Image (cartoon, grey):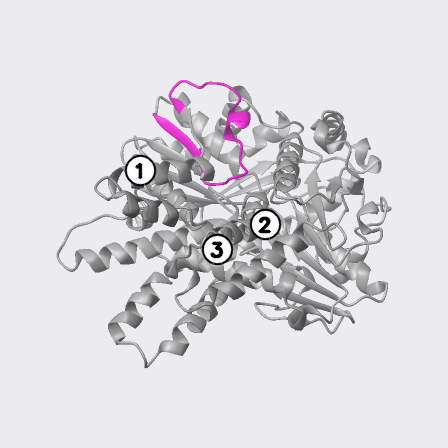
Amino acid sequence: MKFLADPPRFLFFTGKGGVGKTSIACATALHLTRTGKKVLLVSTDPASNVGQVFGLIIGNRITPMDSVPGLSALEIDPEQAATAYRERVIGPVRGLLPDRELASITEQLSGACTTEIASFNEFTDLLTDSDLTGGYDHIVFDTAPTGHTIRLLQLPGSWTDFLHAGKGDASCLGPLSGLDKQRESYSNAVATLSDPERTRMVLVTRAQASALTEVARTYKELSEIGITDDYLVINAMMPSAASVDPLAEAVRSRESDAIDHMPVALTSLPQDRISLKPDNMVGIPALITLFDGELSLSGSDSHVLPPVPAGGLSMIIDELVRSDHGLVMCMGKGGVGKTTIAAAIAVALAHRGKSVLLTTTDPAANLVSTVHGKVTGLSVERIDPVAATREYRERVMATKGKDLDDAGRRVLAEDLESPCTEEVAVFAQFSQAVLESRHKFVIMDTAPTGHTLLLLDATGSYHRDVARQMGEGMHFTTPLMQLQNGDQTKVLLVTLAEPTPVLEAEELQSDLERAGIHPWAWVINNSIAAAKPTGSFLRQRALSEYAQIRRVGELTQRVCVIPLLSSDPVGEAALARLGESSVGELALAPL
């Protein structure tokens, strides 16, 4: 593997959700320890599953792995980080300030912005604090899906510029948090990230047009912030030995075409290709084989696969059309196909005469290319963090700043330059989309799980703030209340029939239930078992799915299964067939 040759101290694995970053990061950590190195494996994903891959509980602390000498792991937990951060700010003044002032500071530090800053501070400490990480030869970062990761990697520069300009907001950084120390830490983080002698960025992708397009965009954005030592890894390619199966051959052909037409910017990068393995990459024995070549296959072509007891998307479309409006949110782990499922539902509803808005909270999603054309009754939008932030700043300056003098307007403008403004702006547009669902169908393709949970945390914070200000007896409706209304909002949990996506969706369902939001249905996407493969390789992969399909059936009463298709469902006609067909019809007639 080229990306493993003479590795620097810091290795980052990033890319679109579901491409296999965690598996490759974990396998890399194992490889380095087997060469005698001491390694710290860190997940910056709010929905980390590193612990599941290794089969142990890790959490927000450095945990030595007894089964792998030389390896320790850490999962940065945003909520725990925020709690510790608030205590560092409030603890020194507790008992010194009046209770009213303490309550005000606590409220200032209760939002999603504080959660982001707290996680970010832990991240910069790992890059710059030799007392914390000096005992490790390598630190391997398994990052959140692309959009969230780019935001994380941009923050050192954003906060450095913000602090060097003499600004700073107590509600973000903490009134007594020591801005000089933070300025130095953030500057050191910028220097580390942009130094190829210390940092290597590994761009992980699949041999799919959408994933390659996104990783090219990531490469461009990383270059713009000074991160240039990039490697490309194309993961989970269909092995040649599987091509006796017509479905496997169709997938191989699709992969080859995607690679042949990959964005030009990627062709100059050092490139590695990793073949799809017959088993899931869970556990140390499996991870050790990830970088091996194609493995010998076992299993019988004549083995009869059990039927998959579930219907397709038409089952839930028939229920949705009974109303003329509502919010449908597709949630789940990155890479499970939320964008495709959301687009298929939107097209199906538009074809049945409904007015539909298809939108996304995922900074890395591309709904336009999925729909690939205009559909009568359907409008497509994206909550663009950059555009949302610009519009929010302009709106605040035009309203709050309208009656201020020049000095006051300068102060307000400087405050709006805080990186935290982006979180507020995105939440405002999300709330507007929720509001529109009172009058039409709004189908929302959400960001991968961790980022979505942070957005819902902001929704909860806003609800509590409104409730506190309105007091008892006053009628009001917040976005959270609409999400909790099962008649108004339908949450679809999208997953694959694999252990990690199912576990993450199960944990997401628990988090939503605690917030009073009850998922309406589950969608199992890209099921090999439902596609009825004929070759031994895909049959071996299919057999591992049944336990996960049964588990989903235990978690919900409404399950849709979409088979692995021979071609990408892109464009109105293909999406319409996906939304209107049953699982059996799709399996017999791949798109």
* Occupied quadrant, residue 353: top left
Magenta stretch contains residue 68: no
Crowding at mark 1 (Cα within 10 Å: few <14, some 14-19, many 20+): few
Earlier residue among tags 3 and 2: 2
Assign a secondary structure to mark 2. Answer: helix
- The residue where tag 1 is placed is 395
Earlier residue among tags 3 and 1: 3
Which residue does the image show at 40% across and 78% down from the upper left? 92
What amino acid type is highlighted by mark number 3? Leu
Magenta stretch contains residue 371: yes
C-alpha gap between disc 3 and disc 2: 17 Å
C-alpha gap between disc 3 and disc 1: 24 Å
Nearest to the observer: residue 254 or residue 585: 254
- The residue where tag 2 is placed is 153
Does any portion of residue 301 appear in the rendered image?
Answer: no
Crowding at mark 3 (Cα within 10 Å: few <14, some 14-19, many 20+): some
Q: Quadrant of the C terminus?
A: top right
Which residue does the image show at 64% across and 61% down from the upper left? 127
What amino acid type is highlighted by mark number 2? Leu
Which residue does the image show at 56% across and 53% down from the upper left? 156
The reply to whether discs 1 and 2 touch (Cβ–Cβ < 8 Å) is no
Question: In the figure, is residue 329 to the left or right of 65?
Answer: left
* Occupied quadrant, residue 317: top left
Up the image or down, 214 lies above or below 46; here it is: above
Q: Position of residue 529 (x, y in %)?
A: 65, 41
Earlier residue among tags 1 and 2: 2
Question: In the figure, is residue 400 to the left or right of 67?
Answer: left
Work out which residue is located at the far left of the displayed protein and give it: 473
Question: In the figure, is residue 137 to the left or right of 147?
Answer: right
